[in-house]
Every structure is written in structure tokens, then in C-alpha cells.
Amino acid sequence: MWNSIIEVVTKVNGFINNIVWGWPVIVLILGTGLLLSIRTRFLQIRKFGDSMNSTIIPTVKSIGRKKDKKTDSIHTVSQFEAFSAAISGTVGTGNIIGVTAAILTGGPGAVFWMWVSAFFGMVTNYAENVLGLYFRKKNSEGHLSGGAFYYISYGMKWKWLGYVAAVFAMLAAIGMSGAQTNKISSTITNAVGYVYDYQNATVVKLIIGVIVAGLTALIIIGGIKRIGKVASKLVPVMSLLFIVMALITICMHIKAVPSALASIFTCAFNFKAAAGGIMGYAFATVIRKGMARGVFSNEAGLGSSVIAHSASEVREPVKQGLWGVFEVFFDTFIICTLSAMMMLTTLDLNALTGAENDTETAILVFSQNFSGFGIVVFTIILPMFAFTTILAWSYYGEKATEFVFQKLGVKGQKIAVVCFKVLYVLLIVASAVIESSLAWDISDTCNGLMAIPNLIGVIALSGLVAKITKNYYERKKGSKVEPMLSAYPELNAEFKSDIESGIGG
């Protein structure tokens, strides 16, 4: 019975996936990034320094300082906590396992197309954050909520498409948590298998699923405040640990770096894939794997991380938008690139049989470089990456659920959110034991569905993004123009007053 259900799900998902990740969506993703790049005059290049200077650099400098109680609202999170919640949703198994899977199925050239998607994704993510903050609203409890469904409904005024975007976001949240949970269970199971020989891996995976579900339930009860605080502690630790391990690995194989980089560029166009080049991959396959894994990793174009950013205490849409630029840069150009270089400098792809799965290959990279210690570190890093992603997407699904059921009133919304959280936690357990490739494929499909209405909204409002950006930088130069902080006059006046009072500027 269970196998029959899985078979049906696999076939249906495969059919939808081929449509969702066909050329039209790939062109839509790249086209959106190109359009925004032109309309903002390639902001991801021009303002990259500004992005660093107004985001991560002052955050690092502020470490250890006491928080100003005047700006510590119970209804918002700090810029860094919003960023941490958002980056925890993007920095997940896609950065390690996803990159490995992209190279195994699309060859080293897939990495090039991940870079291409990230370059345009930087400005796409920026635009999503700007629109998210500009069209966010306050709920009955004073919490700020935003996302693609808000700027589609209130910016484009296509409420039906806003509801579609929210429903797809709910599905994507479940799909993403499923992929992350699956990788936690398979990673720990494979790592334990190196030490202990056991017969029933399914039981071990089920136990892991129950533990992950329990921890998730404890944290998501606290909402974005608790998720942001947990993420702001875990994200720097796990990222730094991974970066150190990756740099050590690359230094150990420094002579292989030139050939690894060369393979990325040459294989992006000559279609030679991994597993000894036994099978040639069509140009479309190389691009699709790179683009799909790139979007899975940095989420630019999905309209997901903007949901976390919209809860930020900052009043200036552009200031939070600049976090989006750094977010994609950090996720893909740093973490994903390091993952790719670890694999390409350590392993001889021609020696692979083609039977290895992504998790086994990723563990092999760590074990070959650091022996048993590497397996232990990998078993710590990957679950941390995955777990923070599960937390972030629970919040995304929660806010989407709120939007879908807003006509039921406050009480109806709360009941709907509780039901979503219960379903979310239960499906975590189920995701721990299903086949790895199916979990990834379902997540890819849901991500693609979520991206379509969001990209339509971003394209339609791209002119507004350019206008808000121009308004911000004109004011920075001293021009006396009315600030564009919110689409709603009452909130715009409130946010303007807050900035003048030194709050959320």
C-alpha cells in the first residue's frame, strides 16, 4: 500500500516538475533578474560595497553591545535576527548536498549556472525585500507581516494571485522541511553506519524524525522572535565551522584548484557530466540542475526569505533590501562555491561509478580529508544547516496560512495556523523515512510553483522598486523628498516619525 502511494506521488510530481522547471520558468527567473538589473542600473554591483557597509560589517562591530531598549519592540526582530532567520532558510542542505547532487547529475558545469542564477538573484532578492517591507501590514496584535502574497495582492491588486502565491508558499514550506529532514535522517544514519552495522535503517530514521519534529515543535511555538534568536546563534557558528573546514580542504588540494575551476567553466557548455562521463547531458539538463539547485539554495525568486525580512524593526525598505544582496552572495558565492571546490578538488569524478547518492558522496569528501573526525564534523554541520532551514520555513508557512485564512478573523487564523503547525511537525516524521531523491524532487517542484506568481509580481512592480531605491539614495544625499517607507499613508507617517525619533532607521 505504502509503495503504491509513493509510486503515484513520484509519477505525479515528476510530471509537474518537468513543467515547472522547463525553459519558460528558467527564462522567467533569469529574465526577472536581468530586468531588475537594468532598472536598478546593476545595483548588485554598484551598491555591493554599500550592502556590506550597511549590513554585515556594522553587525559584526556591534557584537557584545547592549541592545537599545528604545528600539527593542516585542512585535519585531532586529535586522540581524531577521537576516539570520532568512539566511537560516537559505543556508541548508542545498549548500552541501544540493551542490553535490547538482554536480553528480549535471556535471561541474552546473556550478557555473548556480553562479549565474545567484548574480541575478542578488538583485531579485533585493527587490523582493524592498517590496515586502513596502507592502507589509500590521495584524491585530501589532506584528508586521509581509511577503509575495502581500505585494501581489496590494501592489498589483491581483488578490486571486496573492492567494495562489500563499497556497504555493504553504506547499513549499512543507516540501522544503521534508527535504531538510530527509537529509538529516540519511546523514546521521549513513554516518552511524560507518561505525555500527545495523539491519533496519528505517527504524533509525524514524527515531531521528521524531526527535527533529519534537525540537521543531518546541521552537516554532515562540514564533519569529524565538526562531530569530535561535538562528542568530546557530547560523554564525555553523557557517564559520563549515568555512574553516572547506578552506582547510581546499588548501590541502591547492594544486587541484586551477583544474577544478577550469572544469566548472568548460563543462558549463560542453555537457560532460560526472560518473566518468558515461552519459552526456544535454545543455538544458546542465542549466536546469544548476538553476534548480541554485534557487533551492539561495531562494532568490521564490519570495520566501522576504517573509522573515518583513518582520524586521527597520523602517527603510532599501536598508533591509541590501541584506538580501548580501544574503544571496553569502549563500551561493561563498558557501556553495566552497562546497563545490571541496568536492572537485578532493574527488576524481571519473572514478565515480554513478551509483553513489548525494549524501554518500558528501560524506566521502569529508572522510577522505579528515577521516573519522571529518565524519563527525559533517554529522554536526549538515543537521545544523538543515534544522535552521526547517525552523525558518515553518514561519514562512505560518504567515502564508495567516494570509490564506485572513477572512476567518483573528480566531479563525489562529486555529488555521495551529493546524498548519501540527501538520508541519507530523510531516517531518514522515519525511525522515521516504526516499531521498523523492524528497528533493517534491521540494524542487514546490519551489518552482512558489516562484511563478512571485516573479510575476516582482516584474510588474519592478518600476516601483527602482523608484523606492532612487528615493532612498536621494534622501541619503540630502534631498528633501517625502520618504517612501510604506504603501499605506498611515504606516508611512508612523515609520517616518519613528525614524525621526531614532527608531528603526
Image: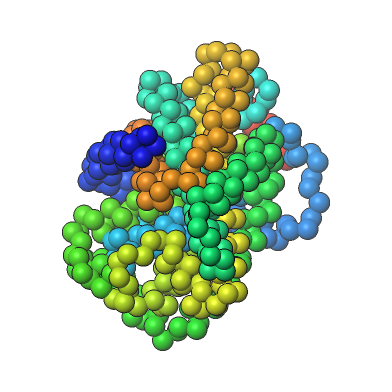
- Taking 244 as reference, is 236 above or below it? above
Residue 13 found in image quarter = top left
In the visual, does 277 lie left or right of 375? left
Residue at the spot 50% in from the left edge and 62% down from the top edge: 190
Can residue 223 be seen?
yes
Q: According to the image, what is the colour scheme of the structure?
A: rainbow
In the visual, does 46 lie left or right of 29? right
The image position of residue 128, as x and y in percent, is: 46, 40
Residue at the spot 32% in from the left edge and 64% down from the top edge: 355
Q: In which quadrant will I find the N terminus?
A: top left
The image position of residue 504, as x and y in percent, is: 67, 40
Numbered label tally: 0
The image position of residue 29, as x and y in percent, is: 32, 45
**Residue furthest to the bottom:** 255
The image position of residue 43, as x and y in percent, is: 43, 52
Q: In which quadrant will I find the C terminus?
A: top right
Residue at the spot 57% in from the left edge and 69% down from the top edge: 195
Residue nearest the observer in this picture, 391 or 452: 391
Can residue 325 be seen?
no
In the visual, does 24 lie left or right of 315? left
Residue 36 found in image quarter = top left
Residue at the spot 35% in from the left edge and 78% down from the top edge: 348
Residue nearest the observer in this picture, 43 or 332: 332
**Residue furthest to the front:** 199
